[in-house]
Image: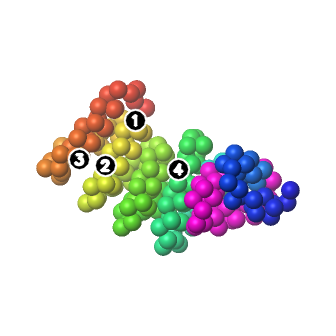
Amino acid sequence: MSIDGLFAQLSHPNPHQRDRLMHEIIASGDPSVSTRLLGLLDAEDVSLRRSAVRAMGAIGPAVEPLIRDKLAESVDPTISASCCKGMAQIAVAWPDHNFSAETIHLLGQKCLEPNPVVQLTAVMALGEMGSLALPALESALKSDDLAVIMATLNALASMNHAEGKLLVEQFLADGAHREDSMIQQAATQALDRFSEQAWQS
């Protein structure tokens, strides 16, 4: 089937069929694939957006610059959130990939955007990127947005990195949100998760 035919069928209601089509699209090696996938990030069909995000994760590091450029220029929350999810998918599928400083910095900025979906997907993406993302997550901990702080604490605990534990301990020691019981509980739970896991050095 032609690449146009494969893309034309991506709205198929069967998720297994969509996955099969995406695998065929990726395997095609067509140079237009990455650009066309980026064009699906604002699709009204949520399943279509999700398929495109997963496909970009499977393609891997080669699409990082394209997703970063799309994220940098986008003012649409749907596109921005999808870009962040695409970065997270790359991080999960390619755990040895070192993301560029430009990507980390941009995601750090998106953590502080006014749209809550963009904020949380940016934090989620950084949480999958390992120690390179720690400075950006440290900045996110200083946000005035309680949802961002809680998501960042969860991301640091999920990373299970010794330096991340230090960031959570410092956050508690600073006492900026000592009057907020939910934040205090989230930070304490994050520390508990560190103690239950083997640290990465």
Mark sitting earlier along the chain (1/4): 4
Residue under pointer 4: 88
User: Which quadrant of the rendered structure holds the N terminus?
Assistant: bottom right
User: Which quadrant of the rendered structure holds the C terminus?
Assistant: top left
- In the picture as drawn, the residue positioned furthest to the front comes out as 13
Residue under pointer 1: 160
Residue under pointer 3: 183
Distance Cα–Cα, label 1 vs label 4: 17 Å
Q: State if disc 2 and disc 3 touch (CB < 8 Å).
A: yes
Mark sitting earlier along the chain (1/3): 1
Image position of 128 with respect to 74: above or below: above
Distance Cα–Cα, label 1 vs label 2: 16 Å
Q: State if disc 4 and disc 2 touch (CB < 8 Å).
A: no
Amino acid type, residue under disc 4 in the picture: Ala
Residue under pointer 2: 150
Residue at 18% in and 45% down: 181
Report x, y in % for residue 117. 42, 60
Image position of 9 with respect to 95: above or below: below
